[in-house]
Image (cartoon, grey):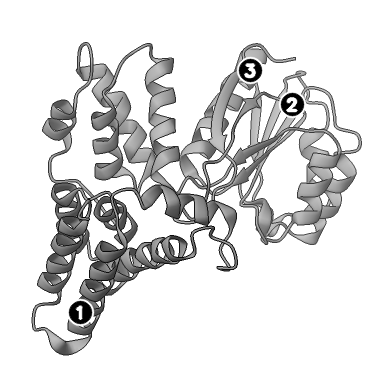
């Protein structure tokens, strides 16, 4: 068994953050084995798993012989050559980074290999999961009992915040909640950049990391989507909603999807408010629960006012206004004022 272990905590559910309940956090041990499959598309998690596995392999044998296999042009029998005992007895590390592009020959050789792996050989393969080609080999690796490390995409802000919290905890440091949120706002669309920023702040800032530290390092880097704006609007946070809206426009987000994201939430809230029980709405239980939570601060008259404001914004965006961005801003301001109004 290799020396040392590491744990990545990832949310497995990986759905669109508008639709997903909070994923259950499950510790996934990143531990070297004769065959290891990294499954998913999240580059940060793939990079971290690979770095940990390579370190464990070199700890086992500093004279390790490493080989990279290009799955798309693999020739039959090459795996036998790579896994055969070496002249000087070094252990071997074989990396297959794009397993979904494997040839039929590689699929056949891997299916045979997983039933009887060679000693002192570690194969690490990466597959994006989903409906990508190569599922037969992926299933065979899992069925044989070899580790499958999840690297599912982290799409929602809650899981990005959990990733930052875990990083800060691991460093035995403290970071304010608003500082963590500011990092997600600034760099959340690129997890590698986001976590690099976290580690840079932990290195450069002494003591507790505050939102002022984040702003000093990353001023002007806020990125936002229509969903982010919608969350702030529903919460009645006008300052945050307008800040996110302007940054969304600056990064190329159009007004129509922003209004659509807000309208989706308002419609769900109005349906649940009108039904009382939430039954018969064609909504999933988690959607009903979320709408109920978001209804706090909203009355039926304020929801009606929000629907009218969004209808006007939609009309203006589709040609009734010469300034579509201003039309969205007006709707956002109106909705935030309606929040908490009886």
- Please tell me which residue is depicted at 14% across the width and 76% down the height of the picture: 324
For marks 2 and 3 on the same chain, the one whose residue lies earlier in the sequence: 2
For marks 1 and 2 on the same chain, the one whose residue lies earlier in the sequence: 2
Q: Which mark is residue 33?
A: 2
- Please tell me which residue is depicted at 31% across the width and 40% down the height of the picture: 184
Q: Relative to the observer, which residue lies in front, 38 or 334?
A: 334
Reading the image, the residue beneath label 1 is 312
Helix, strand or loop status at disc 1: helix
Q: Relative to the observer, which residue lies in front, 186 or 270?
A: 270
For residue 248, say whether it is visible: yes
Q: Relative to the observer, which residue lies in front, 21 or 180?
A: 21
Helix, strand or loop status at disc 3: loop
Q: How far separated are the C-alphas under marks 2 and 3?
A: 18 Å
For residue 96, say whether it is visible: no
Q: Which quarter of the rendered picture does the C terminus lie within?
A: bottom left
- Please tell me which residue is depicted at 55% across the width and 68% down the height of the picture: 281
Q: Nearer the viewer, mark 1 or mark 3?
A: 1
Vertical relation: 261 (above or below) 116: below
Reading the image, the residue beneath label 3 is 63
Q: Position of residue 282 (x, y in %)?
A: 58, 68
| Disc 2 packing (10 Å; few <14; some 14–19; many ≥20) | some
Q: Position of residue 295 (x, y in %)?
A: 36, 53
Helix, strand or loop status at disc 2: loop
Q: Which quarter of the rendered picture does the N terminus lie within?
A: top right
Q: How far separated are the C-alphas under marks 1 and 2?
A: 60 Å
- Please tell me which residue is depicted at 23% across the width and 15% down the height of the picture: 208
Rendering quarter of residue 168: top left
Q: Nearer the viewer, mark 1 or mark 2?
A: 1
Judge from the rendering whether residue 54 lies leftward or rightward of residue 17; answer left or right. Answer: right
Q: Position of residue 328 (x, y in %)?
A: 17, 69
Q: Relative to the observer, which residue lies in front, 165 or 317?
A: 317
């Amino acid at each position: 068994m290799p020396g040392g272990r590491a744990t990545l905590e990832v949310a497995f559910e990986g759905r669109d953050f508008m639709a997903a309940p909070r994923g259950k956090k499950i510790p996934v041990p990143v531990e070297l084995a004769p065959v290891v499959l990294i499954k998913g598309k999240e580059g940060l998690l793939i990079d971290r798993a690979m770095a940990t596995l390579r370190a464990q392999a070199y700890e086992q044998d500093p004279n390790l012989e490493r080989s990279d296999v290009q799955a798309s042009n693999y020739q039959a029998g090459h795996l036998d050559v790579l896994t055969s005992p070496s002249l000087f007895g070094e252990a071997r590390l074989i990396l297959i980074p794009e397993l979904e592009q494997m040839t039929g020959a590689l699929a056949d050789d891997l299916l045979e290999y997983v039933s009887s792996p060679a000693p002192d050989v570690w194969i690490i393969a990466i597959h994006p999961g989903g409906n990508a080609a190569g599922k037969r080999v992926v299933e065979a690796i899992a069925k044989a009992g070899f580790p499958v490390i999840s690297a599912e995409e982290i799409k929602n802000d809650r899981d990005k915040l959990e990733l930052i919290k875990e990083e800060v905890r691991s460093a035995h440091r403290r970071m304010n909640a608003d500082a963590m949120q500011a990092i997600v706002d600034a760099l959340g669309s690129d997890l590698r950049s986001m976590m690099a920023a976290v580690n840079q702040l932990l290195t450069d800032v002494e003591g507790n990391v505050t939102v002022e530290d984040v702003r000093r390092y990353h001023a002007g880097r806020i990125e936002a989507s229509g969903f982010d704006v919608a969350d702030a609007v529903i919460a009645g946070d006008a300052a945050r909603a307008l800040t996110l809206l302007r940054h969304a426009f600056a990064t190329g987000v159009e007004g129509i999807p922003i209004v659509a994201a807000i309208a989706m939430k308002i419609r769900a809230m109005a349906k649940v408010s009108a039904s009382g029980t939430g039954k018969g709405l064609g909504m999933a239980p988690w959607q009903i629960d979320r709408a109920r939570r978001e209804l706090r601060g909203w009355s039926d008259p304020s929801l009606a006012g929000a629907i009218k404001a969004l209808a006007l914004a939609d009309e203006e965006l589709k040609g009734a206004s010469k300034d579509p961005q201003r039309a969205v801003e007006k709707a956002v301001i109106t909705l935030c004022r309606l929040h908490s109004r009886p």
